[in-house]
Amino acid sequence: VVGQMTDMKPNVARERSEITISAKQVIHQREPHFFQRVKRSDSYLTGTVTVSSQCGLRPGTADMLMTGRLRLTSLTLTCVTYLHEWRRIQHQVECDR
């Protein structure tokens, strides 16, 4: 998923946070109900994802590349990086070949 985090609701008891994501691009999604259009006119998809509170994520305007997996009916993030950092790393790897 490529998108921005728009909201965060911490759950201290579970040491997890639920974050709302506005997805500009969903690269792959096994279950079609996680990211949906809220309004027909929306150019983005919205979904809620669970993340460990220790991750240190904060809502912001930067585009992020997020990967995750389905765990007990909840979509859980496994990796998050800023999209510009991912592109920089990808460019370095391609140049090193």
Image (spheres, helix red, strand yellow):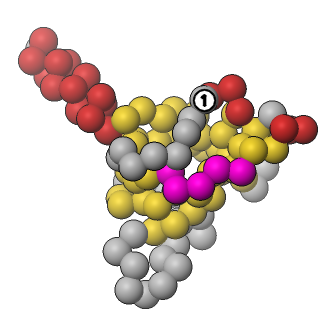
In the image shown, does 69 or 42 lie closer to the viewer? Answer: 42
Label 1 secondary element: loop
Q: Is residue 25 in view from this perspective?
A: yes
Q: x, y percentage for residue 96? A: 12, 12
Q: Is residue 66 magenta?
A: no
In the image shown, does 71 or 86 lie closer to the viewer? Answer: 86
Q: Residue at x 48, y 84 (%)?
A: 39
Q: Residue at x 42, y 32 (%)?
A: 81
Residue 70 relative to residue 72: left or right: left
Q: Of all residues shown, which one is farthest toward the bottom? A: 40
Q: Is residue 7 magenta?
A: yes
Q: Of all residues shown, which one is farthest toward the top? A: 96
Q: x, y percentage for residue 48? A: 62, 58
Residue 28 relative to residue 71: left or right: left
Give the quarter of the image for residue 40.
bottom left
Q: x, y percentage for residue 84? A: 26, 35
User: In the rendered image, which residue does mark 1 sit on?
Assistant: 56
Q: Residue at x 38, y 86 (%)?
A: 41
Q: x, y percentage for residue 59? A: 52, 46
Q: Is residue 31 in view from this perspective?
A: no
In the image shown, does 45 or 13 lie closer to the viewer? Answer: 13
Q: Which residues are magenta?
A: 5-9
Tell me: residue 48, above or below residue 33.
above
